[in-house]
Image (cartoon, rainbow, N blue to C red):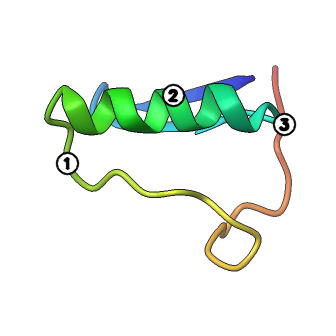
């Protein structure tokens, strides 16, 4: 699982486990978060992830 937070308001979660990902998605919707959407190969503009 990878959690990216930018400016404390833009959050991206990458997760390989579909069950956990679905639970996170539904929880975010339930808690009233806005603009919640799945990241797919078609809509992900990131081509690399670098950690330092």
The CA distance from mark 2 to mark 3 is: 26 Å
**Is residue 20 toward the left or the right of residue 23 in the image?**
right
Q: Residue at x 27, y 33 (%)?
A: 9
User: Does 50 appear above or below 41?
Assistant: above
User: Looking at the image, is mark 2 or mark 3 nearer the viewer?
Assistant: 2
Would residue 34 be visible to someone looking at this image? yes
Q: Residue 17: which disc?
A: none
Q: Residue at x 51, y 28 (%)?
A: 23
The quarter of the rendered structure image containing the N terminus is top right
Q: Residue at x 73, y 38 (%)?
A: 18
Quarter of the image for residue 29 reads top left
Residue count near mark 3 (Cα–Cα under 10 Å), binned few <14, some 14–19, many ≥20: few
On the image, the x and y values in percent for residue 27 come to 35, 26
Residue count near mark 1 (Cα–Cα under 10 Å), binned few <14, some 14–19, many ≥20: few
The CA distance from mark 3 to mark 1 is: 27 Å
Number of numbered discs overlaid on the protein picture: 3
Nearest the viewer among 31 and 52 is 31
Disc 3 is placed on an element classified as loop
Residue count near mark 2 (Cα–Cα under 10 Å), binned few <14, some 14–19, many ≥20: few
- In primary-sequence order, the first of circles 2 and 3 is 2
**Is residue 9 toward the left or the right of residue 42 in the image?**
left
Q: Residue 50: which disc?
A: 3
The residue wearing badge 2 is: 23
Disc 1 is placed on an element classified as loop
User: Looking at the image, is mark 3 or mark 1 nearer the viewer?
Assistant: 1
Quarter of the image for residue 52 reads top right
Nearest the viewer among 47 and 16 is 16
The residue wearing badge 1 is: 34
Would residue 7 be visible to someone looking at this image? no
């Amino acid at each position: 699982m990878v959690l990216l937070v930018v400016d404390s308001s833009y959050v991206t979660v990458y997760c390989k486990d579909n069950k956990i990902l679905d639970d996170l998605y539904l929880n975010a919707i339930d808690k009233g978060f806005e603009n919640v959407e799945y990241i797919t190969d078609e809509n992900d503009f990131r081509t690399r992830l670098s950690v330092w």
